[in-house]
Image (cartoon, helix red, strand yellow):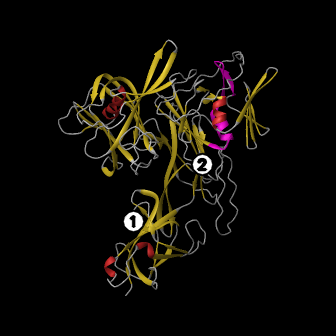
Amino acid sequence: MIRIGKVTKLTGAALLLAGSLTFAGIAGAFGETVPEDVTIREFSLLDTASDVVGAADFTPEGNKDGHFRLQLSLNKKTTINAVVLRSTDDYGKDNDQGIWRTNRATTGWLLGIVQDKVVTTGAGVTHESVIVNPEFRKDVKEPVGEFDGNLTLDLYASNNGTIKETQAYVLEIETPQGTIVSKPIKYKKPMIAEGTPAPVSSPSPSPSATPPAPTPTPSVPSPAPSPAPVPAPATGEKDIDIRVFFKGNELHFADAQPVVKDGRTLVPFRQLFETLGFTVKWVEEGSVQKAIGTKDGLSIELTINSVNASVNGKTVVLDVPAQIIDGRTMVPLRFVSESSGYDVGFASSGNVWTIQIEDAVPGTDPQPTPVPTPTPDPTPTPVPTPVPSAGEVEPYVVKGYLLNASGQPISGVTINADNLLLYDSNMQGETDENGFYRIELAPIPATWRMTTRFSLDYNGKKLDFWLTADGDKSFAGATGAIRNFTLKDVVGHIEIHPDFFSFDDNMPQFDTTDLEITLTPVGKLFDGSAGKTITTNVEALETGGHGVDNIPLGRYKISATWKPEGHAPMPMLLAITGTTKYAQSLEFDFRNILGGGSIFVNQFEAKLAK
């Protein structure tokens, strides 16, 4: 059971306080005292897919919020006067992209806070979501509240137009003892305190007799997005809080909670199938019981206590069978979702497991494949040499291939397995002549994410590349994984800076978007293709300024023409920024931005030819 209510004082905000103390918390000014007996368990950015709060009150307004998670342990009562969330650069310096507050002081948007309160009664354990900060506290002296104990909080930063998962954020928590400033965090880069419990693999099921099979309940609870978390599993991993999201909306299972069996998550049959759009039915044939879902020419059939499932009549072997637990039919979430064409992402922080079910990326196979399909070049190229399979998934092992867009291996590259449980902790392997790598992971209960950074030569220069694994899906170490990397869609952009003093007053009004840019390839592009001439107008760039985006990486000759409406075209002179040599056409190479692997740019000054 989940209830939502509004209160003025709750232990929720204390979550924030812990967030900085044991994890490089910094006092806001000299002489301030760090509050004692406060421990942060987690501070993380979960997603930017929620719409819970507005600019000033706890009301959806049609924009997506930043959704943060905080977990604290407070050994004594602590007063929180105010909480402030700031967007910063990676080093914690303000970048003027947004400030969110609990109290109406100077500038900023609302920081909504929701506490997950665990309530134990004679009828069992329920979770109650209580809104700690329903709106701005108009009196800046009014505290958020007094809190203690172990707390879990969801923070919602109303969207001011700059909320994004690539942004870094810090928290400021003001107490009577001083203001605490957290370290900056980013999406998938949480702060987690040392010693925080992590998920532990469940023991293998004993060969006990199968429980009686009741008819599944016909009712279907309506999945409703809510700040409240899913209660902890009823069986199996009782200390793990499993949260399941479908396209950004959290699913709440009313009849039975998700459970973990042999490292696989099982969820109630009917709600999962109907959420994915299936028509469901329950079939009993003597002692054989089946849960069946059908939609749009797809049929998935699960036999209770059998590892043999059927997808459109084809037998598929499961790691864990569908089964009846405490009178409810439970089915493997990942198998059903991926067989339905969806991608499933998994992450864990402390005792919280988060599972995201999303639409598959176009052109990708939702099932893991040992070798990505090569992308053909615009010009004929030799058929790629077949790459051997990466083999079967192994516990505490991650392996795969690093290939280019043509399916050719890239050797001698260091692959990083980034441990998401422990800050700045990773293991490494190197690709061989076939582009294959294999890393044996530390046998700890943690989640891992795969990345690599390397350099390649092009036109006598080194270009830096930073890649995440295809699909960028994290995985549990105990499960292991196959994660491939593909170097593809390598593009750059150019920026144009007009010299406005080169335009006379008697000329038409100048608009940067009236500049037409022509880019002609010089030699082969980075991907080995001949490329083609690009003629396009200058546009506003997402990164700021004006230029041309998404240019296939290569060496080009550039020229520009000003074409004001109703007037004859006028040629422009160009110079690479930092030089003074202007010409009607220039040859140039792209370059990496300092510290920004896989981002390639060049900048030009433009003035009217006279």
Label 2: few (<14), some or many (≥20) within 10 Å?
many
SS at mark 1 in the image = loop
Residue at far bottom of view:
610
**Left of 312 or right of it: where is 135?**
left
Q: Distance between the residues labelled 1 and 2?
A: 35 Å
* Location of residue 128 in the rendering, given as x and y in whole percent from the top left corner: 45, 25
Q: Provide the residue span drawn in magenta.
A: 321-342
Task: Give the percent coordinates (x, y) of residue 73.
Answer: 36, 25
Q: Is residue 4 left or right of residue 301?
A: left
Q: In which quarter of the image is residue 580?
A: bottom left
Disc 1 target residue = 545
Q: What residue type is labelled 2?
A: Asn
Report which quarter residue 567 is drawn in. Answer: bottom left
Q: Which residue lies furthest to the right in this view?
A: 286
Report whether 418 appears left or right of 399: left
Above-or-below relation of 238 to 503: above
Mark 1 or 2: the one toward you: 1
Residue of label 2: 484
Q: Write the residue at 37% across / 34% down.
A: 134
Secondary element at image label 2:
loop
Front residue of this view, candidates 222 and 241 = 222
